[in-house]
C-alpha cells in the first residue's frame, strides 16, 4: 500500500479535466499523501481548481524533469487508458522515474514489477494495485445475505460517472455523524486511497463474485458498508455489476447519474432510459426477481459537474420530482440527503 507520508507526483499526461484522469482526481480529492506535482504537458501552468474543481494548490508541470525538482518519492500513474494497458510512450517516463530513485504506484493491468523490477534500487518499490492477493477465492454462495448489516452498492447509468466519489462522500457523511460505516473499494483508485479493497476486474469471471463476498464478509461486523460500484448494466462492455450484486447480496443501492446525459459517453448510440426504468432494472436484477436478497434504490447521486450552479440546483430538483427519491450531488453540494436515506434504510432493516 501507499504510506500516507510518501510524497508523490501524479502522471496524468494530456488527461487532467477529462474522465480518464479519475485516478489522478480521486487521489487529489481524497488521498492523504503530500502531492509534489501533477504531470500533464497539455495543462501545465493551469490550476487544479480550474480543471477539476478540487481545492488544492498543486502545480501542474510539463514533464517528469520539472516534477523531479519538487522532490517526489513516488510516481503515481494517474490515468486510465483504454483497456487499462500500458501505453508504449509511457515506458521511457517510467524508466526515467525509476532511474531517478522514484517508486511506482501502478493501477494498470500490466505488471510493472515484471517489467521494471530488475531496475529497482534499495528502498524502491512497485505497487501493482491490480494484482490480487488471492486470485482464486472460493465461489460465492450468498453468505453475505446472512449478515445483519446494511450493504449499499453504488450503481450507475454509465462508466466513469462518479460512483467512487459519491460512495466516499456518503461514507464520510455517515461517519461524521457517528455512524459505523466503511467504504469498500473495488477499483484501483479506491484501493490507492484507502489502502485496502479488491481490484475486481483482475479476477477471473468465476471468482469475481467470490472476491466481493470475501471482502464483504471480512468487514461483516460494520453496521453499514458502502460498496464501490463498477461499470453499468446499460453498458455493453461492462460485466462487473453481477459479481458486485451477487457477492455483496446488497440490500440497498444508490444510483449515480450524470445530469443531462441522454446517451452513454463512450458508445455513441446507446440511449439512457428514464431513471425510473433504470431503477427497476437494477432492483429486479439485484433481487433476481425475488429469488435473492431484496434491494431497493434509496437515493440518486447526481453528477452536476458540467452545469452552472443554477442549472445544477434545477437538475437535482428535477431528478427528485421524476423519481420521488432523495437526490443530491454529494461532491458539489452535500452528501447528507443520501446518507440520511441510507441511515433510514439501515434502521428499517435493523427492525426486521
Image (cartoon, grey):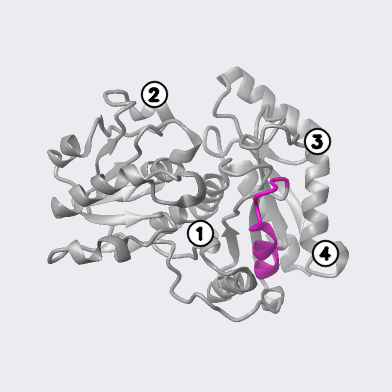
Q: Earlier in the sequence, mark 3 or mark 4?
A: 3
Q: Name the residue under label 2.
A: 50
Q: What element carries label 4?
A: helix
Measured in 3D between alpha carbons, the distance from the residue under mark 1 to the one under mark 3, in whole angstroms, is 28 Å
Could you say which disc has been placed on residue 288 in the image?
4
Query: CB of mark 1 within 8 Å of CB of mark 3?
Result: no
Q: Pinpoint residue 283: horizontal percent, then vertical percent.
A: 80, 55
Q: Pinpoint residue 128: horizontal percent, then vertical percent.
A: 36, 62
Q: Name the residue under label 1.
A: 185
Q: How crowded is mark 4: few (under 14 residues within 10 Å), some or many (20 or more)?
A: some
Q: Which of marks 2 and 4 is nearer the N terminus?
A: 2
Q: In this view, does 7 lie above or below 269?
A: below
Measured in 3D between alpha carbons, the distance from the residue under mark 1 to the one under mark 2, in whole angstroms, is 28 Å
Measured in 3D between alpha carbons, the distance from the residue under mark 2 to the one under mark 3, in whole angstroms, is 32 Å
Q: Which of marks 1 and 2 is nearer the N terminus?
A: 2
Quadrant holding the N terminus:
bottom left
Which residues make up the magenta segment? 234-250
Q: Mark 3 points at which residue?
A: 274
Q: Is mark 2 on a helix, strand or loop?
A: helix
Q: Which residue lies furthest to the bottom in this view?
A: 138
Q: In which quarter of the image is residue 124?
A: bottom left
The reply to whether residue 56 is visible in this rendering is yes
Amino acid at each position: 500500500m501507499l504510506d500516507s507520508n510518501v510524497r508523490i507526483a501524479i502522471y496524468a499526461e494530456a488527461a487532467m479535466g477529462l474522465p480518464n484522469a479519475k485516478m489522478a482526481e480521486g487521489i487529489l480529492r481524497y488521498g492523504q499523501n503530500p502531492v509534489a506535482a501533477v504531470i500533464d504537458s497539455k495543462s501545465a501552468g493551469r490550476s487544479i481548481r480550474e480543471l477539476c474543481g478540487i481545492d488544492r494548490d498543486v502545480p501542474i508541470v510539463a514533464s517528469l524533469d520539472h516534477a523531479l525538482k519538487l522532490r517526489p518519492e513516488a510516481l503515481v500513474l494517474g490515468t486510465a487508458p483504454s483497456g487499462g494497458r500500458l501505453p508504449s510512450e509511457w515506458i521511457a517516463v517510467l524508466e526515467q522515474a525509476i532511474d531517478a530513485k522514484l517508486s511506482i504506484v501502478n493501477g494498470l493491468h500490466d505488471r510493472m514489477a515484471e517489467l521494471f523490477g530488475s531496475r529497482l534500487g534499495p528502498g524502491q518499490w512497485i505497487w501493482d494495485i491490480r494484482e490480487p492477493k488471492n486470485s482464486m477465492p472460493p465461489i460465492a454462495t450468498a453468505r453475505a445475505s446472512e449478515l445483519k448489516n446494511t450493504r449499499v452498492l453504488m450503481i450507475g447509468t454509465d462508466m466513469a460517472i462518479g460512483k467512487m466519489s459519491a460512495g466516499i462522500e456518503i461514507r464520510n457523511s455517515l461517519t461524521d455523524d457517528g455512524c459505523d460505516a466503511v467504504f469498500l473499494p473495488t477499483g484501483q483508485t479506491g484501493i490507492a486511497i484507502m489502502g485496502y479493497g479488491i481490484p475486481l476486474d483482475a479476477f477471473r469471471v468465476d471468482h469475481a463474485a467470490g472476491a466481493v463476498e470475501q471482502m464483504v464478509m471480512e468487514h461483516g461486523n460494520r453496521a453499514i458498508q458502502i460498496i464501490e460500484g463498477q461499470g453499468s448494466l446499460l453498458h455493453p462492455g461492462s460485466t462487473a455489476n453481477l459479481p458486485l450484486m451477487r457477492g455483496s447480496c446488497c440490500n440497498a443501492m444508490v444510483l449515480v447519474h450524470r445530469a443531462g446525459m441522454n446517451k452513454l459517453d463512450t458508445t455513441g448510440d446507446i440511449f439512457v432510459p428514464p431513471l425510473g426504468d433504470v431503477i427497476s432494472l437494477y432492483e429486479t436484477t439485484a433481487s433476481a426477481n425475488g429469488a435473492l436478497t431484496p434491494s431497493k434504490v434509496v437515493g440518486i447521486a447526481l453528477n452536476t459537474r458540467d452545469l452552472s450552479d443554477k442549472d445544477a440546483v434545477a437538475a437535482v430538483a428535477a431528478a427528485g420530482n421524476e423519481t420521488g427519491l432523495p437526490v443530491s450531488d454529494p461532491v458539489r453540494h452535500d452528501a447528507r440527503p443520501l446518507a440520511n436515506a441510507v441511515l433510514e434504510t439501515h434502521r428499517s432493516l435493523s427492525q426486521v
